[in-house]
Amino acid sequence: MIRFDILSVFPGMFTSAFECSLLKKAQEKNLIEIQIHDIRHYAQDRHRVTDDAPYGGGGGMVMKVEPIDRALQDVAPDRDQALIVLLTPQGETFSQKIAEELATYPRIVLICGHYEGLDERVRAHLADREISIGDYVLTGGELPAMIIVDAVARLVPGVLGNAMSARTDSFATGLLEYPQYTRPAEYRNWKVPDVLISGHHREIDKWRRRESLQRTLARRPDLLKQADLSADDLSMIEALKSLREGTE
Ligand code: ADE
């Protein structure tokens, strides 16, 4: 069981994302719990202000530190058990490896920053880890928080129907996944490869491994450097490379 607490000034953004599909089922089965907290609720002034003008001048508004600190004290008073993650484009880039690390915590608190600015003291004193989901700028950390909850939740045992799927999917194995097909065997003259219909399991495994290697070589050669490859894989890669050179 992992509990996620999300601190946001736009709590309404999360409802549909977490009330569908596998994440909904995972909550119903008590495999994960997701609580959304409105940062505004923790603002003390009458107008519930959560941002203010930057010291030193300049445009834009800056998210204030006190409402976030007060929210954290309420949501995770016992900080030892929880990992506090701040979402901004300046963080380390999210990856399957980071998802696996996060999945080892019983509690994760996600603070959704807003790019026009966030008081630096949130970063310096409140967050344990700062994460970006990629080198592009979004309007806020809400979509990144959803992505992180999704990627981490599916690693919790029992969330995916088939226990195998999290282990064999792309990135978990270090290679891209092989192509998959289902019925019908032929559609508009587009045929499923014969080997998959042959029933020869050893041939099927060989074909799948070759396709995985070929696809990774073509699309993400960077992944091959870190993948766990056998001697057979390495000679297959050499063969695929010389085949490609021959067709160029
Ligand atoms: N907030 C705005 N852009 C972001 C990004 N790419 N990752 C995480 N948080 C963000």
Image (cartoon, rainbow, N blue to C red):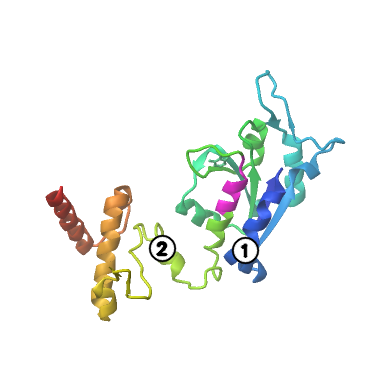
Q: Residue 20: which numbered mark, if any?
A: 1
| Mark 1 closeness class: few <14, some 14–19, many ≥20 residues within 10 Å | few
Where is residue 206, by image quadrant? bottom left
**97 displayed left or right of 217:** right
**26 displayed left or right of 191:** right
> Seen from this angle, which residue lies furthest left?
246
Magenta stretch contains residue 185: no
Report the amino acid beneath label 1.
Cys
Q: Is residue 162 above or below residue 20?
A: below
Residue at x 36%, y 57% (from the top left corner) = 174
Q: Who is closer to the viewer here, 58 or 98?
A: 58
Segment tinted magenta in the rendering: 140-148
Give the alpha-carbon distance from disc 2 to disc 1, as whole Å.
22 Å
> Seen from this angle, which residue lies furthest front?
188
Q: Who is closer to the viewer here, 81 or 8?
A: 8
- Residue that carries the numbered disc 2 in the rendered image: 169
Where is residue 170, by image quadrant? bottom left
Q: Quadrant of ligand 1?
A: top right
Q: Is residue 49 above or below residue 201?
A: above
| Mark 2 closeness class: few <14, some 14–19, many ≥20 residues within 10 Å | some
Q: Is residue 180 above or below residue 108?
A: below
Image quadrant occupied by the N terminus: bottom right
